[in-house]
Each structure stands twice: as structure tokens, then as C-alpha cells.
Image: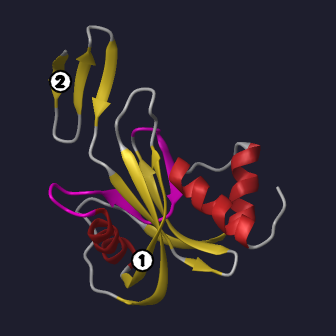
Amino acid sequence: MREVKFRGRLITVAVLDGHWEVVEHPDAVAVMVVRGRELLGVRQPRPAVGASTWEIPAGLIEDGEAPEDAARRELAEEVQLGGRLKLVSRLYASPGFTDEQCYLYELSGAHQAAGTPDAGEDLVLEWRDALEVWNGVLAGTESTSGVTLLAVRHVLARSGVAL
């Protein structure tokens, strides 16, 4: 049994079987743009956590949109890049309370692509060394997303950095 408690623009809160509170949320994509041991990301204010975070380009999949198409769109909107995309992984954002999945892609053959950032987004592009980000997360001084941390770990493993 599913009882809807709230329906908003981006989320629906439902109670399953009279017990489990679930946030239904659109799936998302994120894209690794790699240069050696560096990742391209965007710094942006995140009101939900009351902090500015550094994250790889990411965004929500629109209704009827394929994950790879959403990744292309978000990459063009946020960093004005395009190219070949390869699916690296798929993960749940936080399976204890939400059904949101995130598809992680890696870009190769990068080229300029036209894209317009979403209205209201305040993005600052930054190349970051993956080990610096990893160490910042471990020290509690870096704010980022789980999918960005997975991308950081992926780049470090491929670079031969032992953690």
C-alpha cells in the first residue's frame, strides 16, 4: 500500500505499507571530466546543506529523457562541453529513504558545446586534484556529493594512488 503525504515540484513523499517513509525523486546523472589526476567540477551554493559545495557536473533526468541524453544536456549547460560518454557506474543516492539513482559517466573526446545554465544557478568552474578533494573529505573540510566522491576515488584508483 502506498499513501502519498506530499507532492511537490521535485519530490513526492509517500508512506509504504503504513510504515516506510519514502522520498520519490527523479533520477540524476553526473559526468567525470578528467585531466590527468584532476577533475572538472562546479562550486555552487547548496541551500539544503547551508554550504557551498564542489561537485562534478550533474543534474536531474527529465521525464522521458534517457540517462545519457541527460548527461549530455547537463554537461553542455554546466561546463559547455560535449563528447563521448561512457557509463562508469550507477548508484542509489541514499536508499534508506529515497528511490533516486544516479548514473555516473566519463567524458572522452571533449569539445566545446553550446549550453545555457539553468536560471538561478550560480556555478564557478574549478579543476581540482582528486587527491586534494579526497583528503579534504577525510579531514572534514571538503563538502561534496557522494557521486563526486565516487568519481574522485575512480580517478585515484586509475592513477595508481594507494588509499
Q: For residue 145, say whether it is visible.
A: no
The numbered disc on residue 85 is 1
- Picture quarter containing residue 103? bottom left
Kind of residue at badge 1: Leu
In depth, the one of 70 and 117 nearer the eye is 70
Residue at (32%, 61%) from the top-left corner? 121
Left or right: 7 in relation to 85: left
* Horizontal and vertical percent position of residue 53: 52, 53
User: Badge 2, how many Cα within 10 Å: few under 14, some, many 20+?
Assistant: few
Residue at (74%, 62%) from the top-left corner? 132
In depth, the one of 120 and 14 nearer the eye is 14
The numbered disc on residue 106 is none
Q: Nearer the viewer, mark 2 or mark 1?
A: 1
* Horizontal and vertical percent position of residue 48: 40, 38
Residue at (26%, 57%) from the top-left corner? 61
User: Badge 1, how many Cα within 10 Å: few under 14, some, many 20+?
Assistant: many
**Is 57 inside the magenta-drawn segment?**
yes
Quickly name the residue at label 2: 6
Magenta residues, start to end: 48-66
